[in-house]
């Protein structure tokens, strides 16, 4: 997954170097920036909807710009990472994410739905580019550090949404103009993003393009990983969990405003509760994963999300719905990053391609979700429309067994570890994944631990 001379190829001890710490902090910062921008848009959705005079279905069409941009970005990101490396693709993506609030603010100022659509298109494109590139960087960093990183990285995104939502609620309650709010967010994010990009080593993911050029990397081509049954199943899980998360990002404030007759500030506060629950679930994900394993975690996540969405859709009042949002957020928190981590299993050189393929399927939910839910909500109401999301989340949970490691890796790991540890990799790594530089000489040590 890593380029020549990168830390990802260094011995395990390098995972604790100052450069690696900066690299980790940089990835966290990129996720925070994206979360802040997303929440700034979400919390001002009711105000922007009023500024452009859109109906529920019309707002679904506007939000569709985010989905289209995201799909374009995701479909371009895999090729971009292979040719340019993760850092350069991340730089392009975060630049677009910082420009997007400027365009959204202009659309709100002029009352122009097409301009808002364009702003969401730019933001979606930037997010899509970053989604593959930064997750590939995160998966590479997991192998450097010898422990899970992706749940905490996605937790930083959720932390960013909490911060952005808090600011949005405050400014909404003060009647602060939405345009100046969005423009200020853009100016704040630019220096943070610039620092972060400089801390990421060049070339992650680029080695696969060189291997293909030499005719030795056939297995790392994108289309080949789609022929793997496990990759397809992981993609379906991500599809369901992405819709579970994305439907809250797109519609939760409007559900509370239109469905429960709350004011815009209170509706944004409920979304902040969702974002905080997501952040809590992701930051607590590492010990939970170490104890329960991926399969159980994904099943529990899907069940919690399903329960939360059902209550939000059917609750008799806003208090019950707001409490259920906590379940929704906790349930949606781990499914996406855990499944991407599972896609990064293996050392056959195709890990980046699998991560990209699985993340791409998740963006199908972002593509189809907003307009579909908008049209459905126009006819039956937004609250009943969420029942369809609950069904998809429940179905994703039934496929959770696919997150277990591939059989060959699992058998190798089971032979190397004692029975009670089989299924959990060393140092908290995903099952079946050896830490970088870990010697096979550990095998006799494991044997001693299992012998009477």
Image (spheres, rainbow, N blue to C red):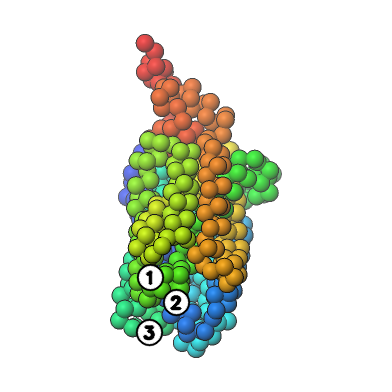
**Proximity of marks 1 and 3: CB atoms separated by less than 8 Å:** no
Residue identifier under label 2: 46
User: Could you tell me residue 311's position as x and y percent?
Assistant: 44, 56
Sequence-first disc among 2 and 3:
2
Q: Residues within 10 Å of mark 2 (few under 14, many from 20)?
A: many
The answer to which of 318 and 435 lies nearer the viewer is 318
As drawn, the residue found furthest toward the bottom would be: 110
Name the residue located 41 percent from the left edge and 22 percent from the top edge: 418
Q: Residues within 10 Å of mark 1 (few under 14, many from 20)?
A: many
Q: Is mark 2 on a helix, strand or loop?
A: helix
Name the residue located 46 percent from the left edge and 23 percent from the top edge: 416
The answer to which of 285 and 8 lies nearer the viewer is 285
Residue identifier under label 3: 177
Name the residue located 55 percent from the left edge and 79 percent from the top edge: 55
**Proximity of marks 1 and 2: CB atoms separated by less than 8 Å:** yes
- Quadrant of the image for the C terminus? top left
Discs 2/3, front: 2
Name the residue located 45 percent from the left edge and 51 percent from the top edge: 307
Residue identifier under label 1: 268
**Label 2, label 3: how many angstroms apart (C-alpha)?**
13 Å
Left or right of 347: which side holds 420?
Answer: left
Q: What element carries label 1?
A: helix
User: Could you tell me residue 436's position as x and y percent?
Assistant: 44, 37
Sequence-first disc among 1 and 3:
3
Give the vertical position of 418 relative to 220 (above or below): above
Q: Is mark 3 on a helix, strand or loop?
A: loop
Left or right of 20: which side holds 68?
Answer: right
Sequence-first disc among 1 and 2:
2
User: Could you tell me residue 439's position as x and y percent?
Assistant: 43, 28
- Location of residue 437 by image quarter: top left
**Label 1, label 2: how many angstroms apart (C-alpha)?**
9 Å
């Amino acid at each position: 997954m890593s380029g020549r001379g990168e830390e990802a190829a260094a011995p395990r001890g390098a995972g604790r170097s100052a450069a690696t710490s900066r690299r980790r902090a940089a990835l966290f910062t990129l996720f925070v920036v994206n979360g802040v921008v997303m929440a700034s848009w979400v919390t001002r959705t009711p105000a922007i909807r009023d500024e452009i005079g859109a109906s529920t279905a019309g707002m679904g069409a506007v939000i569709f710009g985010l989905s289209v941009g995201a799909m374009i970005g995701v479909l371009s990101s895999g090729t971009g990472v292979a040719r340019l490396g993760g850092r350069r693709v991340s730089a392009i993506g975060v630049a677009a994410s910082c420009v997007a609030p400027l365009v959204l603010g202009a659309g709100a100022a002029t009352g122009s739905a097409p301009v808002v659509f364009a702003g969401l298109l730019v933001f979606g494109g930037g997010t899509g580019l970053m989604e593959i590139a930064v997750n590939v960087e995160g998966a590479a960093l997991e192998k450097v550090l010898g422990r899970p990183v992706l749940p905490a990285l996605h937790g930083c995104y959720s932390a960013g949404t909490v911060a952005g939502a808090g600011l949005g609620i405050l400014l909404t309650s003060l009647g602060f103009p939405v345009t100046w709010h969005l423009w200020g967010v853009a100016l704040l994010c630019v220096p943070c993003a610039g620092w972060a990009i400089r801390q990421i080593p060049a070339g992650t993911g680029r080695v696969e393009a060189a291997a293909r050029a030499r005719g030795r990397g056939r297995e790392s081509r994108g289309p080949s990983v789609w022929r793997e049954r496990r990759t397809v199943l992981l993609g379906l899980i991500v599809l369901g969990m992405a819709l579970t998360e994305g439907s809250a990002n797109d519609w939760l404030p409007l559900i509370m405003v239109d469905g429960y007759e709350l004011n815009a500030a209170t509706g944004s506060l409920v979304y902040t509760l969702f974002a905080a629950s997501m952040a809590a679930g992701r930051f607590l994900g590492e010990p939970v994963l170490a104890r329960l394993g991926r399969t159980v975690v994904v099943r529990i996540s899907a069940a919690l999300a399903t329960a939360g969405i059902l209550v939000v859709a059917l609750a008799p009042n806003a208090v019950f719905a707001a409490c259920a949002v906590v379940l929704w957020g906790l349930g949606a928190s781990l499914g996406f990053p855990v499944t991407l981590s599972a896609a990064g299993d293996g050392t056959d050189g195709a890990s980046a391609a699998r991560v990209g393929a699985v993340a791409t399927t998740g963006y199908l939910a972002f593509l189809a979700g907003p307009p579909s839910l908008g049209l459905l909500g126009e006819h039956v109401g937004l609250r009943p429309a969420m029942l369809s999301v609950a069904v998809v989340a429940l179905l994703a949970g039934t496929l959770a067994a696919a997150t277990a490691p591939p059989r060959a890796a699992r058998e190798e790991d089971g032979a190397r570890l004692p029975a009670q540890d089989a299924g959990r990799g060393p140092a908290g790594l995903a099952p079946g994944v050896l830490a970088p530089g870990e010697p096979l000489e550990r095998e006799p040590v494991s044997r001693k631990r299992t012998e009477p």
